[in-house]
Amino acid sequence: MIEKYIHYGRAVYVKSELKGKHKEMCLCHCCNNFKPLDRERNCLIANTLYELDVLYNLVTPVFECPSWVDKEKK
C-alpha cells in the first residue's frame, strides 16, 4: 500500500512497509565516514546525496557504496 504523509512540511508518498526504515537499511548509518553533524568532515557522497534529497524532498537509503568503512573497525 502507498500512503501519503507530510515530511518536512511537504506531502510525500511512501510504501507503507518501508516508512521509517531508512536508517536501518542505509549503509551510511554504519559507516565510519558518515558524520552528518559535521558537513566538512562528512562523506562527500553523503553530502551530495543529502543536497539532492533536500532539493526534491526525497529519502534515499544507500545500499551499495565504494567508500564504506566499517564503524566497528575504525
Image (cartoon, rainbow, N blue to C red):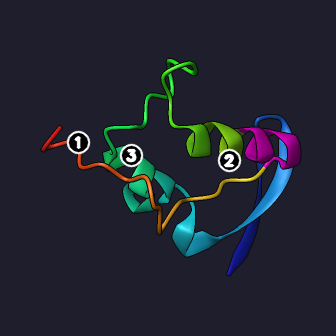
The residue depicted at 43 percent of the width and 36 percent of the height is 34
Query: Viewer-proximal residue, 4 or 48?
Result: 48
Q: State whether residue 71 is above or below residue 39.
A: below
Q: State whether residue 50 is above or below residue 2.
A: above
Q: Amino acid at mark 2?
A: Leu
Q: State whether residue 53 is above or below residue 36.
A: below
Q: Quadrant of the C terminus?
A: top left
Closer to the chain start, of discs 2 and 3, is: 3
Q: Position of residue 17 (x, y in %)?
A: 53, 73
Q: Position of residue 25 (x, y in %)?
A: 42, 62
Q: Amino acid at mark 3?
A: His
Q: Amino acid at mark 1?
A: Lys
- The residue that label 2 is drawn on is 49
Rendered image: mark on residue 71: 1
Rate crowding at label 2 as few (under 14), some (14 to 19) or many (20 or more) other CA atoms within 10 Å. Answer: some
Rate crowding at label 1 as few (under 14), some (14 to 19) or many (20 or more) other CA atoms within 10 Å. Answer: few
Q: State whether residue 20 is above or below residue 46.
A: below
The residue depicted at 48 percent of the width and 22 percent of the height is 41
Cβ atoms under marks 1 and 2 closer than 8 Å: no
Outermost residue on the front side: it is 66
Q: Which residues are magenta?
A: 51-57
- The residue that label 3 is drawn on is 29
**Residue 30 inside the magenta-drawn segment:** no
Q: Secondary structure at mark 1?
A: loop
Closer to the chain start, of discs 1 and 2, is: 2
Can residue 25 be seen in this snapshot? yes
**Residue 53 inside the magenta-drawn segment:** yes
Rendered image: mark on residue 45: none
